[in-house]
Amino acid sequence: MKKHFIASMLTAVSLPLMAAEETANIDGWPKGVVEIKYLSSADNTMQPALYYDPGKDEAVPLLVALHTWSGNYKQKEAAYAKWCIKKGWVMIHPDFRGPNNSPEAMGSELAVKDISSAVDYAKQHSKIDPERIYVIGASGGGYATLLMAGRAKDIWAGASAWVPIYDLKQWHKECVLSKRSYDKTMEKSCGGAPGVSLEVDKQYTVRSACTYLQNASGIPIDINTGINDGHKGSVPVSQSLKAFNALARIEDKLSDADITFMTDNAQIPDKLKMSVNDPLYSNSKRPVLFRRVSGNVRITVFDGGHDIIQEAGLAWLEKQKKGTAPEWNIAAQNKAVLKDANVESGK
């Protein structure tokens, strides 16, 4: 969508926002969050979202919070809004075509452009610091976070992906084996199971984060997974570990054997065990079990399942600024203290 066309729609888009501010509180969301509609460059349709604007005179960060696999823009994810209210950030929680069970959703061109257009809307209606635009999500939202990092790398100052899906074809196999129903929703979106036809296989490819994530090497990306996910949860840890490897330096990549061990046994291999003092995880009773940093990407495996610790993701995002090196605090967080060997993490 050309900028002049977006600008021409400002008056039309502003009216729903003004009306939304007069409505009752949205269920599960704090006061001040309003429902809006914005123009999507995907197909020139008005798309719904939840929105918070602190109304500050100075430019502030923008948080783009993405709903889960089966959720939509009204999904109760109040922690994002509470953070933005406390910090004075702008927040948008777009629908991007709703649950991932239709061709229009699940990483489609429509969904991708809906998210990019949500950023355009915020820039037009609020004072946004272009160097501090962040994206965050868990599960299907983590998948969308990785996808957008690869598809729209120039937007983001940082991306925080929790228990994400990286490779849709692989996850389809995993869901079939685990007898979870997500394989059926993928089939609804892609037109069938992988292998049915070349066109169906193409849909899995073009909608997968693994197809694009290597493009995001310049963006600070924080990937998090619970060690029990895939056992007590729907997305095996291998999805996150392989996403890390896609961006990590050769010398920092996790071996296939270590990924398989963690995935199958829900344990950290002895040679990778470490002690990491990160209160944002331990205070949530999900202490860090393994962490590795490589350039602009970090992987954290915590003691948990298919979970997100919103405060940890948001606190990390707050430290990031576009065009600057990631803030990792490596000295405090990335040293391995091993029981049986003296090996540094990332080596």
Image (cartoon, rainbow, N blue to C red):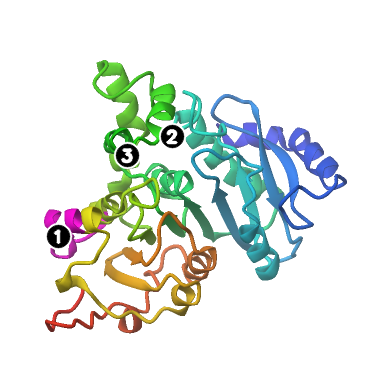
Looking at the image, which residue is at 35% across and 35% down?
Answer: 179
Q: Amino acid at mark 2?
A: Gly
Q: Is 227 in front, or is 74?
A: 227
Residue at mark 1? 250
Name the residue beneath numbered marker 3: 178
The image quadrant of residue 177 is: top left
Picture coordinates of residue 163 (x, y %)? 40, 53
User: On the rendered structure, is 69 left or right of 13?
Assistant: left
For marks 3 and 1, give the CA distance.
Answer: 32 Å
Which of the two labelled residues, at mark 2 and mark 1, occupies the earlier sequence position? 2
Nearer to the camera, 203 or 300: 300
Q: Is residue 118 left or right of residue 196?
A: right
Instruction: Please identify, in this view, whether the residue under mark 3 or under mark 1 is nearer the observer.
Output: 3
Identity of the residue drawn at 48% across and 64% down: 313
Disc 1 crowd, CA 10 A, few/some/many (<14, 14-19, 20+): few
Where is residue 189? Give x, y as percent: 43, 25
**First to last magenta residue range:** 247-261
Answer with mark 2 or mark 3, whichever residue precedes in sequence.
2
Residue with the mark numbered 2 = 107
Q: Secondary structure at mark 3?
A: helix
Secondary structure mostly seen in magenta is helix
Residue type at numbered disc 1: Ile
Where in the figure is residue 213, as x and y percent of width and height?
Answer: 32, 46
Task: Tell me the kind of residue under disc 3.
Answer: Ser
Q: Earlier in the sequence, mark 3 or mark 1?
A: 3
Callout 2 environment at 10 Å: few (<14), some (14 to 19), or many (20+)?
A: many
